[in-house]
């Protein structure tokens, strides 16, 4: 490159640098001038109340925001534009209190507000001159958890206890008027397909079904299920005849009925006929009928599943 061309290139580069410098300088100067001017701006201030009584909680109808009209230069207003200001009031400083209601007066000069907001400009107006605070009784209550589940076992498998939740209850807290209406919570859906082994998982509580102000602890539980190989079992159970009128002799045919059930292989030998009781109630006989309805009234409920009587009725005759 020739010396003449090199000098021209350097000159152009220096001109660009000079232009950029003056552009940045004038832009900064313009910003300083704009921020030095006075502006009027309406802002919404969040309110936080401190030192509430331990057994009380803020009511929905309490004043929790306050709209103000502020006047000041851009530097004073910029912090209140970028982030939502927060006002704090101590309930012990309330000017009046009556049946869980507290009141705060906003001074007309706005000095209290300016101090709390750390604002050096002017407060031209505010929507309310009195803040009202209502409190609810804060109640904690222990309630049961209801499991929502869809479980499909591999054929020949099952579970004696089913899904076990730990813990099986939770503690909710919030306004008493709301907590009193809640009697249980439900889990998110627990779904297993083709289950043939033990399983343990963390299951969330369905919090979105609860009112917004209700707190839940814990928010999730452990769900576990023990799975075992199942087989079919059966027992011949004697039929017990009850409520036979005095002086009547009644015979039934047959005298036994087969009970069929599913049971885990590990519990198969533990089941015997003494665990069951089948009755035929003469008081429930239909008029002109020669059959009695059979009822299974006792069985080992935690060990067997899909229990059924092979016959649902038995024939009878009256001998005298």
Image (cartoon, rainbow, N blue to C red):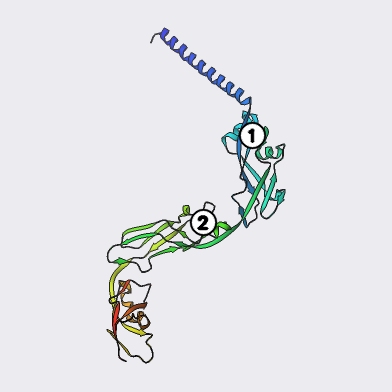
First of labels 2, 1 by sequence position: 1
> Label 1: few (<14), some or many (≥20) within 10 Å?
some
Q: Where is residue 298 drawn, in percent x and y?
A: 37, 78
- 174 vs 7, nearest the viewer: 174
Q: Which residue occupies 34% across, 61% down?
A: 151
* Rendered image: mark on residue 216: 2
How far across and down, in percent of the image, does residue 214 sit?
Answer: 53, 54
Please name the residue that numbered disc 1 is placed on: 69
Image position of 162 (left or right of 77): left
Q: Examine the image and state in which quarter residue 110 appears.
A: top right
Q: Tell which residue pokes out farthest to the top in this image.
A: 4
Q: Does 250 sit left or right of 77 as displayed?
A: left
**Residue 36 sits above or below residue 144 on the image:** above
Q: Which of these two is toward me, 25 or 106?
A: 106
Instruction: Left or right? Give the position of 214 relative to 263.
Output: right
Asked which secondary structure carries label 2, the reply is strand
Relative to 61, residue 153 above or below: below
For residue 68, say whether it is visible.
yes
């Amino acid at each position: 490159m020739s010396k003449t061309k090199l000098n021209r290139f350097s000159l152009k580069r220096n001109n660009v640098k000079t232009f950029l410098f003056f552009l940045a300088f004038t832009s900064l100067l313009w910003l300083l001038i704009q921020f030095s001017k006075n502006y009027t701006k309406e802002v919404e201030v969040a309110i936080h109340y401190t030192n509430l009584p331990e057994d009380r909680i803020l009511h929905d109808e309490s004043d929790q925001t306050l709209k103000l009209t502020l006047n000041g230069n851009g530097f004073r207003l910029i912090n209140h534009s970028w982030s939502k200001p927060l006002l704090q009031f101590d309930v012990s400083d309330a000017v009046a209190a009556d049946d869980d209601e507290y009141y705060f007066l906003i001074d007309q000069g706005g000095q209290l507000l300016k101090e709390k907001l750390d604002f050096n400009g002017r407060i031209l107006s505010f929507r309310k001159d009195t803040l009202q605070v209502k409190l609810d009784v804060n109640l904690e209550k222990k309630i049961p958890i209801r499991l929502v589940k869809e479980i499909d076992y591999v054929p020949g498998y099952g579970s004696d206890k089913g899904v076990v939740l730990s813990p099986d209850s939770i503690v909710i807290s919030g306004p008493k008027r709301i907590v009193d209406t809640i009697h249980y919570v439900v889990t998110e859906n627990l779904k297993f397909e083709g289950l043939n082994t033990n399983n343990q998982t963390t299951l969330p509580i369905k919090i979105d079904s609860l009112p917004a102000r209700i707190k839940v602890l814990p928010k999730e539980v452990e769900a576990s299920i023990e799975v075992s190989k199942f087989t079919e079992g059966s027992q011949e159970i004697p039929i017990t005849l009850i409520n036979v009128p005095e002086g009547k002799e009644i015979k039934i045919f047959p005298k036994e009925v087969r009970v069929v059930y599913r049971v885990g292989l590990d519990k198969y030998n533990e089941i015997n006929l003494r665990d069951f009781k089948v009755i035929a109630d003469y008081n429930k006989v239909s008029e002109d009928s020669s059959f009695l309805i059979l009822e299974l009234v006792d069985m080992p409920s935690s060990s067997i599943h899909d229990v059924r009587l092979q016959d649902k009725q038995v024939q009878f005759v009256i001998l005298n």
